[in-house]
Image (cartoon, grey):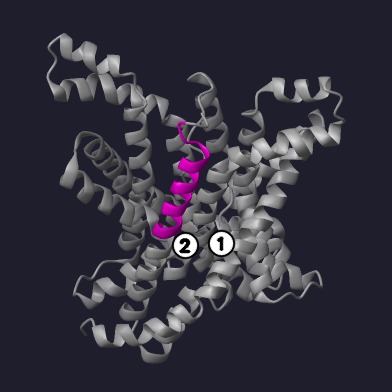
Amino acid sequence: MNFDFAFAATTLPTILGVIGTTISVALLSCAGASILGFSFEIARRAGSLPAYLMRFTIDFIRSTPVLAWLYFLYFVLPHWGFTLPALVVGILGLSIYFSGYLAEVFKAGIDAIPKGQAEAAKALGLNRIDVVSFVLAPQMLRNVAAPVGNHFVSILKATPYLAAIAVPEMLGSALDIASNTYRYAEPLTVVGIVFLVLALTIAQGVRLLERKLHGPTNR
Amino acid sequence: MTTVEIFVGIFEGFRVTATVTALGLLYAVPFALVFGVAQYLTKGMARLAITAVIEFWRSSAVIILLFVFYYVLPVIDIQLPAITVAAMVLGLNAGGYGSQAVRAGLQSLDRGQFEAAAALGLPRRHILALIELPQALTRMAPTFINQLIQLIKGTALVSLVTLTDMTFRAKEIAESEYNPVGVYTSLLLAYFVICYPVTVFGRWVEQRIGGRKGLTNEF
């Protein structure tokens, strides 16, 4: 059996056809993971007991594989009476898995803001909510933009795990072609190249963003 | 089956999980050292070629790499056991991340370290091996520990290429026994009891070397 380049080319349109699913899953999971991660981080700052609980939650999530989370949600949620589409389960799984990492990003982003910022704002008479939303949050966003971008690339690279719970993303469609034609090498090589190009492009974009936000003039 | 029996049943896959991790390290550690140092020392075309190899392993989705190598190698007449392919792919992926930590560690050293050693007349290879690498590797130790955790978690993937690791055992048990909560909670716990001590150890190392943070956005 040889590698059939002509056949490989014919699989490209089918695989690229679901690139939208892959990107939407990654975007929604990144949003979900950011919201969850930010909530963990805010909760962690609410006292010593919440701090302990949140640290344990984050450590637990970070100590368990994404595949185990996907299986857990996929098989346990229906048992508890929540029958969700596999796509939603997948987004939920990636959101939980990456929230543990994003919580650390937000932690670093908040810690990096000089203490004087909040103190000065308070001295000017801003209330707590205003201090957070107009002084801390905008500066935190600048600090976290690049790391969140890097995690977005990681999330994108984790989307093929969803093939394990039958979500029709790019790896899933490549495996479908493979099992229909009994030719595995070609569709898988194609999906590998597509993913590599996609990940490298987005990573390059994140690097440009990083340079724009933390260029010499902003340091 | 009680939950304890399920947990023990899942742990029957520990041997494979541990073997893939250990074999993976045999690929990851040399790759990270050689390519990290090479990227640090070279310039121009040579550096570009080295970066390309690193980026291939680092920027590809590891699950796709596993499928590609598992199915493409036989097509070009390379027959390897699944465990070898899995260890190589997971190891070189981890090694790709590791190489960036090695390079970043070397670059973060004070230039004076190199200059002082050169002024004392040490040859370049001795400067690297005796002055630069020991400091860089110590500095990056927390990052390497994080990557070890990623490698351990990554081995869950081998269940998809028919190796009976802990994740595969969980799926086997789930087929004979309808108890998704018990099975998949046990699966998460099984990884947790392995990775959590490593997390705690990593935090201890991080504190010992002066609270320096590992590169949290690289994993």
Relative horizontal placement of residue A103, taking residue A205 as reference (left or right):
right
In the displayed structure, A196 sits above or below A182; it is above
- Residue A211 at x, y = what percent? 46, 41
Q: Dot 1 corresponds to which residue?
A: A67
- Residue A172 at x, y = what percent? 49, 77
Residues shaded magenta: A200-216
Q: Chain of mark 1?
A: A
In depth, the one of A8 and A204 nearer the eye is A204
In depth, the one of B212 and A112 nearer the eye is A112
Q: Residue furthest front?
A: A217
Q: Which amino acid, by three-letter code, is at mark 1?
A: Leu
Q: Secondary structure at mark 2?
A: helix
Q: Dot 2 corresponds to which residue?
A: B157
For the point 51% across and 28% down, which residue is it?
A219
- Residue A90 at x, y = what percent? 63, 67
Q: Residues within 10 Å of mark 2 (few under 14, many from 20)?
A: many
Judge whether residue B88 is colored magenta.
Answer: no
In the displayed structure, A202 sits above or below B219; it is below
For the point 50% across and 25% down, which residue is it?
B205
Report the Cα–Cα distance between label 2 and label 1: 7 Å
Number of numbered callouts drawn: 2
Q: Residue furthest top?
A: B120
Q: Which mark is residue B64?
A: none
